[in-house]
Image (spheres, helix red, strand yellow):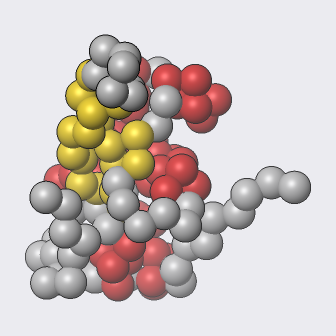
Amino acid sequence: MGRYVGIPIEFWRNGWIIALSPTSIALLFALLESQGGYSEPRYVPKQRRSEYGFSHNTWTEARKELEEHKFLTVSRTPQGSDFDYQRLRNSYWIEQSRFMDKPGSPLRSHEHGTD
């Protein structure tokens, strides 16, 4: 059975479908699927990123656009166990409350806190 991603009606109603590029929308949906059900930022492993089919450049450009529109928060998280070499990796969090806003409006005060 596949995973499903729910997109609020406000995505269309508030005009995000027009405000975001198709590439950013694709990354938004991919990150929502990856985030599915978790309550903290998620690291997306290289294999999973390749399964989504994004090139490195496409991922980076779409990521920047989502950050500019305040949909995406990127943080750095250590990956690896205490016995392995630990590297800092990008972790991603989609600000789902942003769907409720119209493009160009500031992010609401109930954004997800990432220390």
Q: Nearer the viewer, residue 60 or 18?
A: 60
Decide if residue 17 is on the left or right side of residue 71. Answer: right
Decide if residue 42 is on the left or right side of residue 66. Answer: right
The quadrant the C terminus occupies is: bottom left
Q: Residue at x 45, y 83 (%)?
A: 10
Report which quarter residue 111 is drawn in.
bottom left
Q: Nearer the viewer, residue 22 or 28?
A: 28
Residue 48 image offset from top left, x and y in percent: 58, 31
Q: Residue at x 26, y 39 (%)?
A: 77
Residue 5 image offset from top left, x and y in percent: 63, 64
Q: Is residue 35 visible?
A: yes
Residue 93 image offset from top left, x and y in percent: 34, 56
Q: Nearer the viewer, residue 39 or 27?
A: 39
Outermost residue on the top side: it is: 85
Q: Nearer the viewer, residue 47 or 97?
A: 47
Asked if 25 appears above or below 50 in the picture, the reply is below
Outermost residue on the front side: it is: 83
Q: Residue at x 33, y 27 (%)?
A: 82
Q: How many marks?
A: 0
The quadrant the N terminus occupies is: bottom right
Residue 104 image offset from top left, x and y in percent: 17, 71
Q: Is residue 16 visible?
A: no
Q: Residue at x 25, y 71 (%)?
A: 112
